[in-house]
């Protein structure tokens, strides 16, 4: 159960030596980094499926090519109140084998050669093992809106299978455990109190918190299709979904805190694509 008094730093300290699944064991055996989230609370939360090789080396989420694309879009839309994390905090990968079934080695300038690995989607059991960390991270960040990146992240958060290219951009509500308990009606008589062994008791259930979720494409998928930047391309779909989340956040800030929008949700797709292409040169 989440603890509202806990800090994100304390949550990270609790989990950074985790070996609940094979990903943590692999991380420890290969000297990889535990990749915790970073960013601002009470804004837009982006959740990917897991760190890649660059993230594993630096210990920071979304700093590879996918991260550069995502951060380029956020910069153009003037999004500063964002938080980025992943479904799993350790890299999910498998060894690269040669034609003889032996591990391929990566030569280094200094030191012995190391085995090569390729990224793979985390399995459902691995996602489940990391779920308590993610749910508590969401609770402590307390975002206004969540954007999941890719099918694995969306399915893990929503709790059912979907087709990300078809279901992206649609609004969902997810529930995660909250702090404390709330009163609950009895099952049979639908009353707030009941007698147990002659004593009156009030049934309670764990509290939950609901969040708005918008699934979208993973930036890695968009990069594989980057040659297509025309109308309704994967790039435009990603931009449109993030723009939708930015608009929801801006509306919330305006209505609740009387803060005027930065205009990020009105930034055109063309200006975002031009900015990314300029940065990518």
Image (spheres, rainbow, N blue to C red):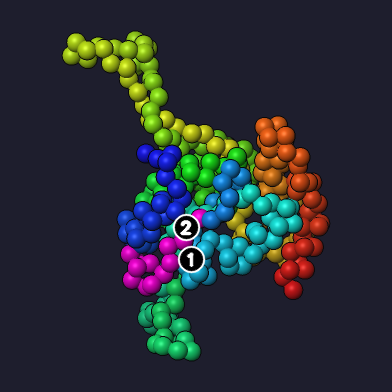
Q: Secondary structure at mark 2?
A: loop
What residue is shown with label 1? 59
- The residue depicted at 28 percent of the width and 16 percent of the height is 201
Q: Secondary structure at mark 1?
A: loop
Q: Position of residue 44 (x, y in %)?
A: 61, 46
Q: Quadrant of the C terminus?
A: bottom right
Structural crowding at the residue carrying mark 1, measured as other residues with C-alpha within 10 Å and reported as few (<14), some (14–19) or many (≥20): some
Tally of numbered tags: 2
Q: Is residue 117 magenta?
A: no
Q: Is residue 122 left or right of residue 172?
A: left
Q: Position of residue 50 (x, y in %)?
A: 49, 59
Indicate which disc, 1 or 2, sits on the residue closer to the N terminus.
2
Is residue 99 visible in the rendered image? The answer is: no
Q: Is residue 203 left or right of residue 90?
A: left
Structural crowding at the residue carrying mark 2, measured as other residues with C-alpha within 10 Å and reported as few (<14), some (14–19) or many (≥20): many
- The residue depicted at 51 percent of the width and 37 percent of the height is 174
Q: Are marks 1 and 2 in contact (CB under 8 Å)?
A: yes
In this view, the residue farthest toward the left is: 197
Q: Is residue 34 magenta?
A: yes
What residue is shown with label 2? 36
Q: Is residue 164 left or right of residue 262?
A: left
Task: Tell me the number on the disc at residue 107.
Answer: none
Image height of 220 relative to 247, above or below: below
Q: Quadrant of the N terminus?
A: top left
Image height of 187 relative to 57, above or below: above
Image height of 117 relative to 260, above or below: below
Q: Quote the CA–CA distance across marks 1 and 2.
A: 7 Å
Is residue 184 visible in the rendered image? The answer is: yes
Segment colored magenta? 25-37
Image height of 248 relative to 62, above or below: above
């Amino acid at each position: 159960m989440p603890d509202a008094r806990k800090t994100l730093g304390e949550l990270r300290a609790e989990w950074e030596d985790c070996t609940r699944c094979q990903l943590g064991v692999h991380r420890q055996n290969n000297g990889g980094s535990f990749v915790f989230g970073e960013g601002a609370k009470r804004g837009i939360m982006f959740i990917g499926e897991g760190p890649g090789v660059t993230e594993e080396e630096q210990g920071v989420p979304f700093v590879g090519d996918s991260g550069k694309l995502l951060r380029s879009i956020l910069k153009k839309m003037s999004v500063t109140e964002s938080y980025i994390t992943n479904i799993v905090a350790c890299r999910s990968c498998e060894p690269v084998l040669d034609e003889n079934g032996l591990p391929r080695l990566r030569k280094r300038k200094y030191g012995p050669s190391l085995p090569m690995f390729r990224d793979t989607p985390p399995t459902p059991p691995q996602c489940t093992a990391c779920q308590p960390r993610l749910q508590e991270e969401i609770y402590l960040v307390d975002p206004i809106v969540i954007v999941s990146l890719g099918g694995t992240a969306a399915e893990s958060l929503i709790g059912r299978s979907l087709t990300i290219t078809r279901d992206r951009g649609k609004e969902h509500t997810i529930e995660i455990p909250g702090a404390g308990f709330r009163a609950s009606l009895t099952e049979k008589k639908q009353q707030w109190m009941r007698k147990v062994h002659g004593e009156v008791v009030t049934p309670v259930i764990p509290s939950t918190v609901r969040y708005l979720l918008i699934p979208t494409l993973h930036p890695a998928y968009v990069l594989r299709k980057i040659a297509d930047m025309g109308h309704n391309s994967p790039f435009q779909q990603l931009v449109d979904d993030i723009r939708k989340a930015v608009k929801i956040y801006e509306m919330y800030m305006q209505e609740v805190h009387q803060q005027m929008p930065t205009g990020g949700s009105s930034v055109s797709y063309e200006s975002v694509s031009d900015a990314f292409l300029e940065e990518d040169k």
